[in-house]
Amino acid sequence: MKPEALVISASRRSDIPAFFMPWFMGCIARGEFEVVNPYNRQVKRIPATVPPVHTIVFWSKNFSLFLDAGWGDHLKRMGYHLYFQFTINSEDRLLEPNLPGLTLRLEQLRRLCDRFGAQAVNWRLDPICHYRWNGDDIRDNLGDLERIAEAAGAAGIRRCTTSFLDTYPKIARRAARHPGFRFVEPDRSRRARILLDLERVLSALGIGLFTCCENETLAALPAPSTIAPAACIPNDVLMHLYGGRLSLQRDAGQRRSAGCGCRISVDIGSYDRHRCPHGCLYCYANPGP
């Protein structure tokens, strides 16, 4: 029996496609990634060759340089399978100050789907944020939902993954640097209504809605809802797309009790070595202000 292959996550910890692809491709050329555990600082060397690597899962909010430089095409020619987690939330410059305009990101989505197949691209509406700014009424980042959903449906997207903001201490500290701003957490019933509204909009376009680490909210949904928990590293989907043999074991390093369905992978990013310049106010990964 052939050994199980590796899935590389690039990365939950930073936006590698937007900013760190030269480093990534250098590791590919050397045949290994040097990964530093963010908690105990132990260093592991992870193979970067095919085999044993089966699929690279790229996470990004901006695939412009990735597409323009042809890195994905080069990796495909080398035998790597590719899967994409593309976060597209809104045009909100307060929450996401350094992203390109929404029109450009929707064009990137179309290009990804055309080049690599829509079945290999997952749209992330993540996280859903609610906040107050200078005493105004509660705002959210769902104002561009229908525009994004229509573009995603036209591109062939059939899956959307969403979650609500978790206010980690470093997120609260970052928000506190903006006088008059604070995040607001909707209660469970409100979150459930939001998900049902999203489901209605997306189902009309043939897009299924999945949640990331939202077991509590899912428990409040009525039985007819088809919203289901997601696996953002979906090894069963990757085997369906590309064949081969991958582990279906749940990733013990993720928040399984909250509803994370991710399967085993190796994340090769670094919170400190790969600090993301996007500057998103809600980011749990970036340690900076």
Image (cartoon, rainbow, N blue to C red):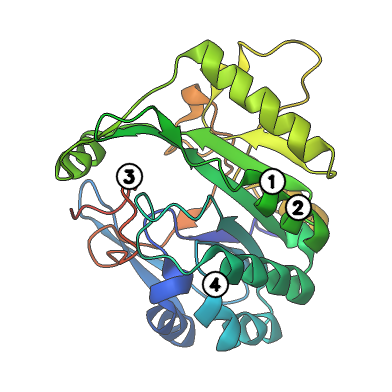
Contact check, label 1 and label 4, Cβ < 8 Å:
no
Residue 56 image-quadrant placement: bottom right
Cα distance in 3D space between marks 2 and 3: 28 Å
Cα distance in 3D space between marks 2 and 4: 19 Å
Q: Nearer the viewer, mark 2 or mark 3?
A: 2
Count residues near mark 3 (Cα–Cα under 10 Å), then give few for <14, some for 14-19, many for 20+: some
Q: Which mark is residue 146?
A: 1
**Residue depicted at 60% across the width and 81% down the height:** 67
Mark 4 or 3, nearer chain start: 4
Count residues near mark 4 (Cα–Cα under 10 Å), then give few for <14, some for 14-19, many for 20+: many
Relative height, residue 146 to residue 134 (above, below): below
Regarding residue 9, the answer to whether it shows in the image is yes
Q: Amino acid at mark 4?
A: Phe
Regarding residue 243, the answer to whether it shows in the image is no
Mark 1 or 4, nearer chain start: 4
The answer to whether 277 appears left or right of 235 in the picture is left
Relative height, residue 29 to residue 182 (above, below): below
